[in-house]
Amino acid sequence: MSTFDDDDARVPLLTRDALPEEYRYLMDEDVLGELNLFGAMGHAPRAMQAYMRLGTALWGVGDLSARERELAILSVARSCRSRYEWHQHVALGRAAGVTREELRGLARDDDTPFTEREQAVVRYARAVAAGTVTGPLFEAAEAVTDRETVVGLTLLAGHYLLTARFLDALAVPTDDPFVGWLPGE
């Protein structure tokens, strides 16, 4: 995927005040604020509301820890080369305990720094994004989690795949300068 500037976005990036009154709360600071993702998505406010509700629900499905969830999202972002998703989730991953070296491993498609369970989560999320899930990958993910968690992981990875494609199709730029694929350089 490419780097985009605000001027390159295929739709104007809306502000909170540009939304219909009943949807403005979606861009309140206590939700997620006026991110460029939502500025683009705001052209379809009812869909944005549903998207945000689904995303919120998926964060708590199964027994993934916050760290595992961020590893999965970052794996999808890297697999799709979604700079926006990667950029947004580097900080969230760091807050959930993902180290700089682990981020660099994900950026290089190297899952050796992770535990067996985390490797299964990373590999499975990456395969969902690439459309290459096999029986053994599914079974490995289910073996270290449980059925509810692997189904939730599938939905989570699919949600972030949809997000990556949305961002790319509408050429949505990162909200501030890209952190880079190898954070810390």
Image (cartoon, rainbow, N blue to C red):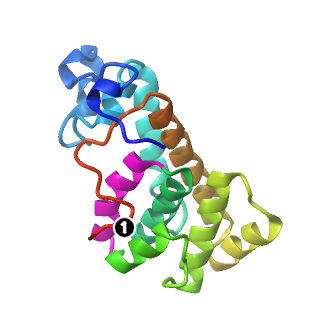
User: Is residue 88 located in the magenta-colored stretch of the structure?
Assistant: yes
Viewer-proximal residue among 69 and 79:
79
- Work out whether 127 lies above or below 52: below
Residue 55 locus on image (x, y percent): 45, 45
Viewer-proximal residue among 64 and 180:
180
Question: Taken as a whole, is the magenta stretch helix, strand or loop?
Answer: helix
Residue 5 locus on image (x, y percent): 30, 33
Residue corresponding to mark 1? 182
Residue 63 locus on image (x, y percent): 52, 69
User: Is residue 93 located in the magenta-colored stretch of the structure?
Assistant: yes
Viewer-proximal residue among 18 and 23:
18
Numbered-mark total:
1
Question: Considering the numbered disc 1 on the image, is that residue within a helix, a strand or a loop?
Answer: loop
Quadrant containing the C terminus in the rendered view: bottom left
Residue at position x 55%, y 64% in the image? 62
Location of residue 95 by image quarter: bottom left
In this view of the protein, can residue 99 be seen by the observer?
no
Q: What amino acid is found at the position of numbered circle 1 in the picture?
A: Leu
| Left or right side of 88 for 137 | right
CA neighbours of label 1 inside 10 A, class few (<14), some (14 to 19), many (20+): some
| Left or right side of 131 for 183 | left
Residue at position x 46%, y 60% in the image? 74
Residue at position x 33%, y 37% in the image? 173
- Work out whether 179 lies above or below 136: above
Residue 160 locus on image (x, y percent): 51, 47
Query: Which residue in the rendered view is the most extreme toward the right?
Result: 135
In this view of the protein, can residue 104 be seen by the observer?
yes
| Left or right side of 97 for 56 | right
Viewer-proximal residue among 127 and 109:
109
Residue at position x 24%, y 32% in the image? 27
Q: Which residues are magenta?
A: 82-97
